Image: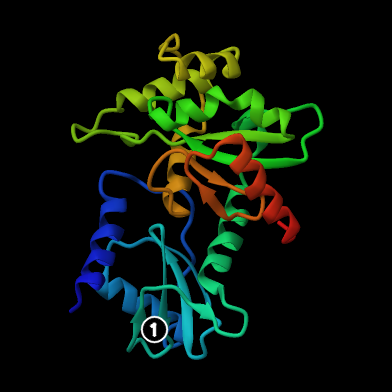
């Protein structure tokens, strides 16, 4: 089999390793239906893949499957699996990107604002969701420009995504995870967050918090690093973006109806 196929399998399995993904996967369809065949095909090829969504694809005879942070196409008879970008030849747009954006928008909408750390102007024109880690250099650079982003009318809503994961190889919580829990449990989250971005560790704290759920959400929608910046329509618009580039990107997606 092709190297690309094995890379897909390996990356799906890697996402599962050491992490318990949150959220219920799509329920099994009745036996012998195309959806059941599609499910069985993927489970045979990648047994540990967590299937989140199976829907008819724009490509006749195929189904679109979102599983373990990947989107693939599988024929209804289970004979073919396509791992790649599906392009609408009429207008040259990526149907794969559109499908990802719709799924991400739906999943991100489930996260209440109260579970996010928000830096926003009084009357925001645009909103971006940013998966962040307090230790990553470009996350820190982005946050240094938070006032400039707000001045452009952009509200920044942060979600936690500790790059080292929730638990380490020893099964214990990672240092970054514990630091982000302390921030989300702080009396003043925004202040604790900003201080952490300057390299100052927050006061240790613990409480009921959304850090693990947000990390798992990131895995489901394909986050692989930080920062990961999403427009309101669910499109991944970049990693680090300067205020000017961020403004241009959110304007473009707003103009498209995002």
Q: Residue at x 50, y 47 (%)?
A: 238
- The relative height of residue 202 versus residue 120 in the rendered view (above or below) is above
Residue 40 image offset from top left, x and y in percent: 34, 78
Residue that badge 1 annotates:
37
Q: Residue at x 38, y 58 (%)?
A: 68
Q: Residue at x 45, y 53 (%)?
A: 220
Residue 183 vs residue 89, the one in the foreground? 89
Identify the image quadrant of the N terminus. Answer: bottom left
Residue 166 image offset from top left, x and y in percent: 34, 34
Residue 129 image offset from top left, x and y in percent: 59, 41
How many marks overall? 1
Identify the image quadrant of the C terminus. Answer: bottom right
Residue 186 shows up from this direction: yes
Side of 258 relative to 81 (left or right): right
Quarter of the figure with residue 225: top left
- The relative height of residue 41 versus residue 141 in the rendered view (above or below) is below
Q: Residue at x 40, y 14 (%)?
A: 199
Residue 109 image offset from top left, x and y in percent: 65, 48
- The relative height of residue 237 versus residue 97 in the rendered view (above or below) is above
Disc 1 is placed on an element classified as helix
Q: Residues within 10 Å of mark 1 (few under 14, many from 20)?
A: many
Residue 153 vs residue 101, the one in the foreground? 153
Residue 120 shows up from this direction: no
């Amino acid at each position: 089999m092709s190297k690309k196929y094995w890379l897909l399998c390996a990356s799906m399995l890697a996402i599962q390793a050491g992490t318990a993904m949150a959220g219920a996967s799509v329920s099994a369809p009745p036996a012998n239906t195309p959806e059941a065949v599609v499910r069985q095909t993927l489970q045979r090829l990648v047994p540990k893949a967590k299937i989140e969504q199976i829907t008819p694809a724009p490509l006749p005879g195929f189904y679109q499957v979102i599983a373990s942070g990947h989107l693939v196409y599988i024929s209804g008879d289970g004979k073919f699996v396509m791992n790649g970008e599906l392009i609408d030849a009429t207008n040259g747009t990526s149907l794969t990107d559109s499908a990802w954006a719709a799924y991400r928008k739906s999943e991100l909408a489930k996260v209440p604002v109260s579970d996010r750390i928000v830096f926003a102007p009084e009357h925001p024109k645009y909103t971006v969701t940013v998966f962040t880690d307090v230790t990553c250099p470009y996350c820190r650079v982005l946050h240094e420009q938070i006032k400039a982003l707000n001045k452009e009318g952009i509200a920044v809503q942060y979600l936690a995504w500790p790059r080292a994961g929730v638990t380490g190889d020893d099964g214990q919580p990672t240092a970054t995870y514990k630091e982000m829990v302390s921030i989300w449990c702080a009396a003043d989250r925004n202040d604790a967050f900003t201080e952490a971005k300057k390299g100052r560790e927050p006061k240790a704290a613990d409480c009921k918090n959304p850090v693990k759920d947000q990390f798992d959400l990131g895995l489901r929608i394909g986050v692989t690093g930080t920062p990961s910046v999403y427009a309101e329509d669910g499109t991944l618009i970049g990693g680090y973006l300067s205020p000017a580039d961020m403004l241009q990107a959110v304007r473009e997606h707003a103009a498209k109806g995002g």
